[in-house]
Image (cartoon, grey):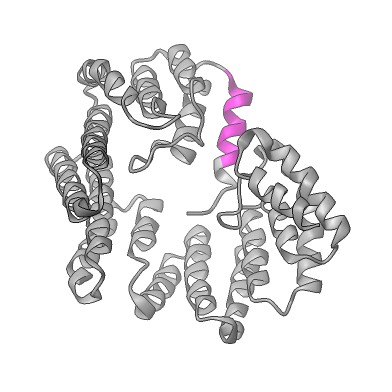
């Protein structure tokens, strides 16, 4: 059974093999009917659990199958703390947030299996309350989680983004930045945190239409990224060092074009996209044109050319995102849905909106 399990596990991360992965995992489960790991991999095809591979398309999610598997692990694996992460995630998926919170609360009883269950209990209750709309309770759990090790500022700030409170998000990011020194992190981790802080501040200022601050934080993100690269320079070959500097330039240009789009400078964005294509083609990634297509799609959409926008979106997909630039996943799906709607393809558009609405996960 192990060979079938490992085959199914590896195939779970390849979009072209997801159905084969299900076949292999089902074979493994037939041979070993009570293997928790196999059940988790199968569950993850219908429910986001963690980094356990890809999910099926939203119209193929089988809620009846999902419920039967949830009942199974709750009955047969109640001795494992992670069971209640999965059960809680199931209730979050179907928007039964009070039931999700009850399940996450049970994680406190499993601290003998690892302190991570107390961490997860606080974090997941914070998230469930966020999506429930009880932001005061969510903040209380985020604060309890921060008291443990101070590592949740990134997600905490996104609670404010979720409710479009950009100033609140910036306050949290400022607090994170002020506390970085006291967290006593390794230098590389601290620099990576500064990159994340400035990236998120860029998004906040850009979506809050504060142009000067938006541009300033694009520059601060670039500087922090270069500092992070220079810190590890002695561990890199000359070629690797050059590649990482070029990547920093590429990410900066991505944000500048995105900035132009968010501030309505569509002609400026289109001009930048000409040279940006050749810059993208030099990136060593099989999906190196993903951002190029998405940014073109956003420009086309805002200029009223929904047909061209859809064509650009169709040149890539939501799973092809590039490190450091969040133009994938839900962001991609949302704006593709808008393009489809503008083009009169209401049924396809609604399907994508429903996909986003049922996904209450960071």
Q: Please say if 235 is above or below 240.
A: below
User: Residue 278: horizontal and vertical position, in percent?
Assistant: 28, 19
Spot the residue most to the front: 237
Instruction: Name which residue lies at 75% across and 39% down.
Output: 20
Identify the image quadrant of residue 353: top right
Does residue 64 appear anywhere in the picture?
no
User: Residue 129: horizontal and vertical position, in percent?
Assistant: 50, 65
User: Residue 33: horizontal and vertical position, in percent?
Assistant: 85, 63
Does residue 90 appear anywhere in the picture?
yes
Residue range of the region highlighted in magenta in the rendering = 345-355
* Residue closer to the observer: 251 or 122: 251
Q: Please say if 276 is above or below 107.
A: above
Left or right of 271 on screen, residue 311: right
- Give the prevailing secondary structure in the magenta stretch: helix
* Residue closer to the observer: 162 or 146: 146
Instruction: Name which residue lies at 26% across and 37% down.
Output: 243
- Magenta highlight on residue 81: no
User: Residue 230: horizontal and vertical position, in percent?
Assistant: 17, 51
Left or right of 297 on screen, residue 36: right
């Amino acid at each position: 059974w192990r060979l079938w399990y490992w085959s199914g596990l590896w195939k779970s991360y390849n979009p072209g093999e997801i159905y084969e992965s299900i076949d292999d995992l089902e074979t493994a489960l037939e041979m070993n009917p009570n293997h928790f790991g196999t059940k988790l991999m199968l569950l993850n095809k219908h429910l986001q659990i963690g980094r356990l591979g890809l999910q099926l398309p939203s119209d193929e999610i089988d809620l009846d199958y999902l419920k039967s598997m949830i009942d199974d692990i709750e009955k047969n694996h109640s001795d494992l703390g992670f069971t209640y992460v999965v059960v809680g995630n199931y209730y979050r998926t179907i928007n039964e947030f009070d039931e999700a919170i009850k399940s996450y609360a049970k994680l406190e009883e499993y601290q003998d299996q690892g302190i991570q269950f107390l961490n997860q209990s606080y974090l997941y209750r914070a998230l469930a309350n966020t999506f429930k709309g009880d932001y005061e309770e969510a903040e209380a759990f985020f604060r309890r989680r921060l008291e443990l090790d101070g590592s949740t500022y990134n997600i905490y700030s996104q609670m404010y983004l979720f409710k479009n409170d950009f100033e609140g998000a910036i306050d949290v990011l400022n607090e994170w930045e002020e506390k970085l020194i006291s967290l006593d992190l390794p230098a590389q981790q601290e620099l990576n945190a500064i990159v994340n802080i400035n990236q998120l501040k860029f998004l906040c200022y850009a979506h809050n239409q504060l142009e000067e601050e938006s541009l300033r934080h694009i520059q601060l993100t670039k500087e922090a990224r270069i500092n992070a690269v220079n810190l590890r320079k002695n561990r890199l070959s000359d070629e690797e060092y050059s590649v990482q500097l070029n990547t920093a330039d590429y990410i900066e240009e991505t944000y500048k074009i995105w900035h132009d789009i968010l501030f309505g400078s569509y002609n400026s964005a289109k001009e930048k996209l000409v040279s940006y294509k050749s810059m993208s083609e030099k990136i060593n990634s099989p999906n190196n044109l993903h951002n190029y297509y998405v940014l073109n799609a956003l420009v086309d959409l805002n200029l009223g050319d929904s047909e061209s926008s859809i064509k650009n979106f169709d040149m890539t997909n939501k799973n092809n995102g590039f490190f450091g630039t969040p133009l994938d996943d839900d962001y991609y799906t949302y704006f593709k849905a808008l393009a489809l709607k503008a083009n009169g393809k209401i049924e396809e558009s609604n399907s994508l909106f429903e996909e986003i609405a049922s996904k209450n996960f960071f």
